Amino acid sequence: MEEESTARFTAFYRQHYSLIVSTCFRRLSDFSAAEDATAEVFRIAWDQFKGGDAPSVAWLYGVARNVVGNEYRRSKRSRALRDRLEGEALVTSTQINAPVLEAMSRLKSADREILFMSYWEDLAGDEIAAILTISAAAVWVRLSRARDALRRQLESTELAPASSGKSGNSGNSGGQRNG
């Protein structure tokens, strides 16, 4: 049965590969990116085949449009990040980044994950919500808590050489919430 399914998929792939790769190329204007998108389209189609459903050409074309749309969004985020980094003074010294990386490593994995999604991967709140299957409001609450946890970790790192225990220093300008 599996051999028959593989043979059907191979025939389907050969029949529709040129249509999908040319469709992706027309939209992406980059043959390498079009080949990558086409590979993703047929990976999704293979999953469909394994489930017992033979996808139609219209379905395949729709998947190609979705994959190309994902590539547009990824490319847009990548360009925006590149532009933002070019506009900022880039700090690449591991000596300067070490306290941040150390503080991040001490956070709960959920806090690290949401900080990475928001600041390193530059995902929007609704995208994070969809990935984590939570509401947008919950994203902002978790992000706020994760930032607070990171701030506390950084402050404890900065205070560690000056004192042996936790400091009750309330003179910083970080503003504390009561409630």
Image (spheres, rainbow, N blue to C red):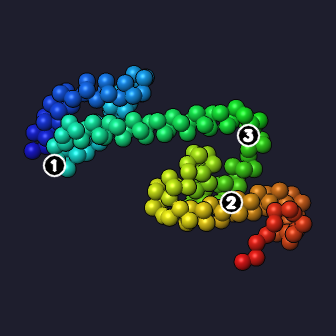
Residue at x 59% of width, y 46% of height:
122
Secondary element at image label 2: helix
Residue at x 13% of width, y 34% of height:
7
* Position above or below: 35 against 41: above
Query: Residue 147 location in percent, x, y?
Result: 68, 59
Q: Nearer the viewer, residue 29 or 8?
A: 29
Q: Is residue 153 visible?
A: no
Amino acid type, mark 2: Arg
Q: Is residue 132 visible?
A: yes
10 Å crowding of disc 3: few (<14), some (14-19), many (20+): few
Tell me the distance, in whole angstroms, between the alpha carbons under discs 2 and 3.
Answer: 21 Å
Query: Residue 30 location in percent, x, y?
Result: 43, 23
Instruction: Report the residue marked by disc 3.
Output: 94
Decide if residue 179 is on the left or right side of residue 11: right
Tell me the distance, in whole angstroms, between the alpha carbons under discs 1 and 2.
Answer: 46 Å
Q: Earlier in the sequence, mark 1 or mark 2?
A: 1
Marking on residue 147: 2
Residue at x 23% of width, y 46% of height:
48
Q: Earlier in the sequence, mark 3 or mark 1?
A: 1
Write down the quadrant of residue 42 in the picture. Answer: top left
* Position above or below: 122 against 84: below
Amino acid type, mark 1: Gly
Secondary element at image label 3: helix
Instruction: Report the residue marked by disc 1.
Output: 52
* Position above or below: 166 against 54: below
Residue at x 56% of width, y 62% of height:
139
Q: For marks 2 and 3, give the one nearer the viewer.
A: 2
